[in-house]
Amino acid sequence: MRVAIYGRPTSDNLSEPVKELFAKLKKQKAALLLHAPFCKFLQGKGIVDKNTETFTSHKDLKGKVDYMLSLGGDGTLLETIYFIRNSGIPILGINTGRLGFLANVSKEDIDMALKAMAGKKFTLDKRVMLRLETKSKLFGDVNYALNEVTIHKKDTSAMMSIHAYVNGDFLNTYWADGLIIATPTGSTAYSLSCGGPIISPNCGNFIVTPIA
């Protein structure tokens, strides 16, 4: 079993349950790949060996690991999308931070989660993502989003007229400060704060929410 681990170098990831996590993965003889800055942080604390393998981009993971562990809160899990993209690698979110809506495995349940992962006794919660394509390749090859894509005006300029189309068919012209296109996962994020609806994570809908 090859496991990639992404986390932030924070005190939350120095707790005893996190230290036990690495001990249990070692006991399971799992091959580990750690995000390079996080690995350096843990090596300085004596939690992982100096020869631990690292990754720095999605190219280091695709087709090479079985699972990705995200150590932190929901924000940390969202950052893992940069490395997962369309590789299909399952993510297990372990909540060592505050908000755990997506990273919903508590520190107390780490042992149970690892045993389920090792024994492949789990179900996958599949989430749709957005991919943004522009003529100028605005975001390069990092054009994936789990929550939303937002068009927003600059500074205090006047409202914009945004012409929206679906599959080439005209939908509406929005006169607003901006427009949010959200996934079901993102329905509880920025879109919700702008009055958008909450929808089931597993439905196939997308949300169009005008801003102001």
Image (tube, rainbow, N blue to C red):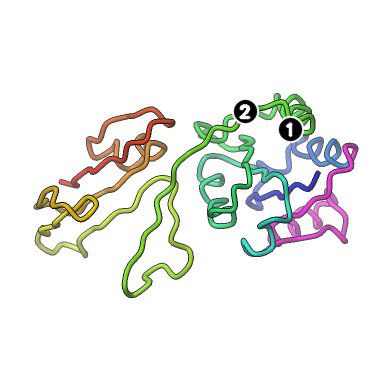
Foreground: 20 or 65?
A: 65
Find out whether residue 51 is within the magenta segment. Answer: yes
Identify the residue position indicated by label 2 in the image.
Answer: 123
Residue 50 screen position, x and y as percent: 87, 60
Mark number, residue 117: 1
Is 12 or 169 nearer to us in this picture? 169
Quarter-of-image position of residue 70 = top right
**Identity of the residue furthest to the bottom in this view:** 136
Residue type at mark 1: give it. Met
The answer to whether any part of residue 96 appears in the image is no
Q: Earlier in the sequence, mark 1 or mark 2?
A: 1
Picture quadrant where residue 26 is located: top right
In the image, what residue occupies the spot 57% across and 51% down? 80
Image check: 133 left or right of 35? left
Please, is residue 157 above or below residue 64 in the view? below
Residue extent of the magenta highlight: 27-55
Give the x, y percent position of residue 53: 80, 59
Left or right, 207 with respect to 74, comes to left
Number of marks drawn: 2
